[in-house]
Amino acid sequence: MDFLVLGPVEVRESGAPVRLRGMRRRRLLALLLLNAGHAVSMDVLVDELWEDPPASARHQVHNAIRDLRAALTGSEGAGLITVDVGYRLDVPADAVDAQRFTDWVRAARTARREGRDAEAMRLLQAAVDLWRGAAFADIDCPLVTAVAAGLDEQRLTAVEELMELRLAAGETGSLVAELSALTSRHPLRDALRGSLMLALYRSGRQADALAVYDEGRRLLADELGLEPGPRLRRLQTEILADAPQLQRRTPAPGRLPVVRSVRDNYLPRDLPDFTGRAAELARLDRALDDPGAGSPRTVVIDGMGGIGKTALAVHYAHRRTADHLDGQYYVDLHGYSPVRAPLAPEEALGVLLRSDGVEPGSLPAGLAERSAIWRSRLAGRRALLVIDNAADAAQVAPLLPGAGDTLTLITTRRKLTAMDGALSLPLGPLAPAEAEALFQRVAGDTRTDPFLSRTVALCGHHPLALRIAATRLRDRPSWTVPDVAARLRTSGGRAGFLRTADRDLMSVLALSYAHLPVEALEFTRALALHPAAVHDIPQACAATGLAPSDVERLFDTLLDHNLADEPTPSHLAIPLLLRDCAHTVTLPSRDTAPQLTAVA
């Protein structure tokens, strides 16, 4: 049995259509297919099927499910299952044409990257041929409509890539009529207009190619107040100059030239003086290059404040850009911000969808709808997503892709234990040699100094602390490394020295304490004031007066928030800088929520 959604919704058994009585049953099937393999709650079904649900809505859904189940009886591998919250439709992955489309487009892009353009062209053509009209053409449920828009965008992108491949294969005149019709239907698509210009030029119609450019420029100016993109402007210049690179090429048999287009890149700037993390970078490469790693791939980078999570994620994302040419996206969730509340998932999805070209006025309001559109737009693409500063797994989950070759890098100060299937990369202090190299690079002084190892140790091998200390040394030409070490010797000295007009290490670290319950704060303060660096459970009980079971629970809380280390089982160590911070925070009343501020 085949389920067809790339056009009007249909079900076919051995090529023959299966009758689905009534539009409500078709809408119900569409909603279940959108979530194939996953439960859809009765509340969602009712809300999507009626603007103003009647009292009998649930009963009508039950009846429609009964009819659907009867229509699907005998379908090999398909089943409509009743679950606690609603219903789940189980179907083979290749039984839905949208899934076949996504798989073939993904395979075509892999073939194209590997230089197998003839195979890529065949796969893209097969994928495009699956379409019989607009996706879910006869279904008007809000959620379905939103996902359909994403699928239609994927189709257009696949058509654009197919046109590029056919041009690279030597087709010209035969494409002009096809590209003219496509450009007429989608006049603001630069890629289609550019392919039409190139096809006309290679057909000896230079004037017509330039006229197509002028038409597009006028449309953009009149409707959007914009100029054509740099790629189209460059093509116009090359056509005017009869540039040699525009001439038709005759590819070698069996291998066509690889044509790559890079979508928008929203990644923050990579640090020009990024230093260290060799072990972590190597681990990421090994894990993500493993053929058995699966897709989409997700990495959670967790660690204390200022430890370099964002720097590592952004640096690695830039290293992987060439492997993810279908877009590089970034969103800061502000999970630990001193000036604003964490970004709600629907707000974050608004940022990402606008980055991917969705007009603000076209964005649905609901979280489920935005999440579905985002997943649909990423499906079948090799994209890269950096989700920075996550507060918890609930804030991240709606942003994750559901399919495709997307790589997602998440940074957080907490252990996200609910992120099933993700690679966990805990980030600790730099290795001593890496810490020394970073200090010297920022300070601009590579001379050997016997006090250097002591100085970076007093910074806890902590990247932000090292940067602040090295910057202060760089900006005070009369100072030496021993002068810096002297100012870092005491807890109070470190707190004051590692604070500038722009950056304050203690304030950065204190943001993590604001997420702890009061009893965990009191427990941390008591251990931080104790002279011992490492505590086992009996020692912690003696220092705090708590029962062993409470100590074990609070041990776990601190470890989950990356506010302590566990050098050996049942032993807790609070790093040097976190002990300093615990000395400088104001403990809130047990009757109020934690409101921590760093004090001098």
Image: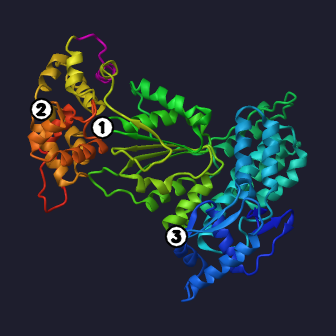
Could one spot residue 583 in this view of the protein?
A: no
Disc number lying in front (1 or 3)? 3
Where's the C terminus, which quadrant?
top left
Query: Pointer 3: what residue?
Result: 84
Would you say residue 312 is visible in this rendering? yes
Answer with mark 2 or mark 3, whichever residue precedes in sequence: 3
Q: Is residue 171 above or below residue 31?
A: above
Nearer the N terminus, badge 1 or badge 2? 1
Q: Disc 1 on helix, strand or loop?
A: loop
User: With 202 as the anchor, is 49 left or right in this view?
Assistant: left
Kindly state the secondary structure of the residue where label 2 is placed. Answer: helix
Residue at 45% over, 37% down: 314
Query: Are the two marked residues, 1 and 2, in contact with CB atoms closer than 8 angstroms?
Result: no
- Are circles 2 and 3 on residues that touch, CB within 8 Å? no
Residue, disc 2:
491
- Give the colour scheme shown: rainbow
Q: Residue flagged by tag 3: what amino acid is it?
A: Asp
Direction right: furthest residue: 174
Q: Is residue 138 magenta?
A: no
Q: Quadrant of the N terminus?
A: bottom right
Q: CA distance from mark 1 to mark 2?
A: 18 Å
Which quadrant holds residue 527? top left
Of residues 528 and 492, the one nearer the viewer is 528
The amino acid at mark 2 is Ser
Q: Does 259 sit above or below residue 343?
A: above
**In the image, residue 447 lies in the stretch drawn in magenta:** yes
Closer-to-camera residue (422/472): 422
Task: Tell me which segment is drawn in magenta.
Answer: 437-449
User: How many angstroms separate mark 2 from mark 3 (CA)?
Assistant: 56 Å
Question: Residue at (63%, 44%) from the top-left corner?
Answer: 230
